[in-house]
Image: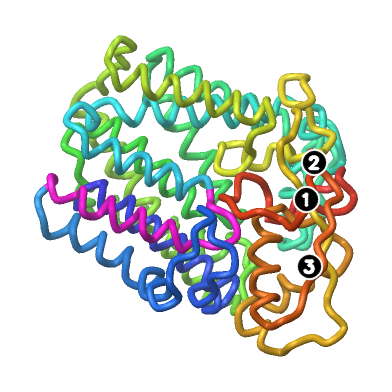
Amino acid sequence: MTYDLVLVLALICHQLNTVLRDGTESLRHGFAPVLGWRPPAVLAMPLQILALPACALIYWLLPVPYGWFAVVLLAAWISVQNWRLANHVWLAFVALVLLQLPAGRGSVSPLLLGAMYASAGAFKLNGQFLRSEESYGRTMIRLYAGYLRIRPPQILLRAAPVAVAVVELGLGAGLLLNLPVQPLFVVAVGLHFVFGISGNFPFSLVAVVLWALQMDPAGRLRTPSAAGLAATMAVFVAGLLLTTRSVYRKRRVGALAAGTFAGLYALTVYSAAIASGHGSPRPIDWFTPLAVVITAAAVLNLGSVVLGYRSEAAFAMFSNIQPFGPAKPFGLTPRWRARYYTLSLPEAFPAALLDRIPATLLYRSTGGRNFVYEPFAYQLERIARDSRVSFEPRQVLGPPRTGLPRPGPLLFPPLLPNDLSKAAMR
């Protein structure tokens, strides 16, 4: 089994995780496409259900050059994703594209991983993440402690945000400076296991596959020994017992899925660890065209957030950076280009709206507690006008503009809380 296939399996895990959390309506609804283009309804659900299994079959049955067909299918699948595009989905897609290039298979992983960790750590160097009570670092610990029914010590709440930022910056610097990979890998495995049991094993699996690609020149998942199988089973049980279940509608099924994700994570870690004893990973050659392109893209990614052009799928995950909020990346206040609106429910509410917009999301968008990002407001208003009503959008944030909201890709969070010091809903 190639690591390309394991990356697709990680995306299947992501989709399964979404269904277990949000229900099967996440496959059916097309209310807010992340790329801003709404495909025909007759295509949306088949693409949601069939695209990833088809990609997996291509990587399993066909030679490497046919991977381009899988990349096209994956792009089509991304086009029907709703609401928010997870960072790890974007990371996996970019990795699979670059792995199709002749120069990509040996050098993609350290560049992508280094850029991801360095960006994620750098974005967290803001007072809102490091010191505030609204820090995502503290919030995640409180949520997990609540799942375990324990009270986290204050020293842990204060230290955790700083520790996460330092570890991510250290991993990024170590990879980009061609430091020995094995110690960095050990730290990354521990970090991503913690991320996994907090409810995000799909992201951890994508990351560890990229580590395995760097450490294993063969590029294939290795068959585990008896000891490897025993370790995998132990991690499966740990994932089953330790992963937070509160996000799942059916907690027992969610726990079983989390255990399965953890087991696949353990198999990939085992394969990378075994491979690390059979040769040294190739260091980054900064003068190759691919290295120059990825470096330029990483710099543009950082700049796009600092200058206020986007915050989604930018590896600013859980950094507390969001439009018009108090977080200042690198001590700077971005000039946010996003426009946000308020929406109101019409007096005569057509029940047909609930067939196209999830009820919970409709309530959050029109209940007066959140501002709605312009392209998302456009999509909701378009659906409302199909039923001959209006949500009466009124602009409240961003560069002033008259008229109705305009369409576009979801470059910013679809919803912002009225209290901008609070974190945006994920």
Instruction: Specify which label sits upstream in the sequence, 1 or 3.
Output: 1
Residue 221 x, y percent position in the rendering: 23, 48
**Which sits in the foreground, 196 or 16?**
16
Secondary structure at numbered mark 3: helix
Magenta run includes residue 74? yes
Q: Which of marks 1 and 3 is in front?
A: 1
The residue labelled by disc 1 is 340
Mark 1 and mark 3: Cα distance apart in space: 14 Å
Find residue 387 and name its label: none
The residue labelled by disc 2 is 398
Please give the range of residues in magenta: 64-86
Q: Is residue 408 left or right of residue 142?
A: left
**Which sits in the foreground, 234 or 157?**
157
Magenta run includes residue 4? no
Secondary structure at numbered mark 2: loop
Mark 2 and mark 3: Cα distance apart in space: 20 Å
Q: Is residue 66 left or right of residue 417?
A: left
Task: Give the amino acid at mark 2.
Answer: Gly
Determine crowd level at label 3: few under 14, some 14-19, many 20+ residues with C-alpha closer than 10 A: some
> Residue most toward the front?
403
Find residue 364 and name its label: 3
Determine crowd level at label 1: few under 14, some 14-19, many 20+ residues with C-alpha closer than 10 A: many
Q: In this view, does 34 lie to the left or right of 297?
A: right
Going 71% across and 70% down the picture, which residue do you hit? Answer: 361
Mark 1 and mark 2: Cα distance apart in space: 6 Å
Secondary structure at numbered mark 1: strand
Instruction: Specify which label sits upstream in the sequence, 2 or 3.
Output: 3
State if disc 3 and disc 2 touch (CB < 8 Å).
no
Residue 29 x, y percent position in the rendering: 54, 74
Instruction: Specify which label sits upstream in the sequence, 1 or 2.
Output: 1
State if disc 2 and disc 1 touch (CB < 8 Å).
yes
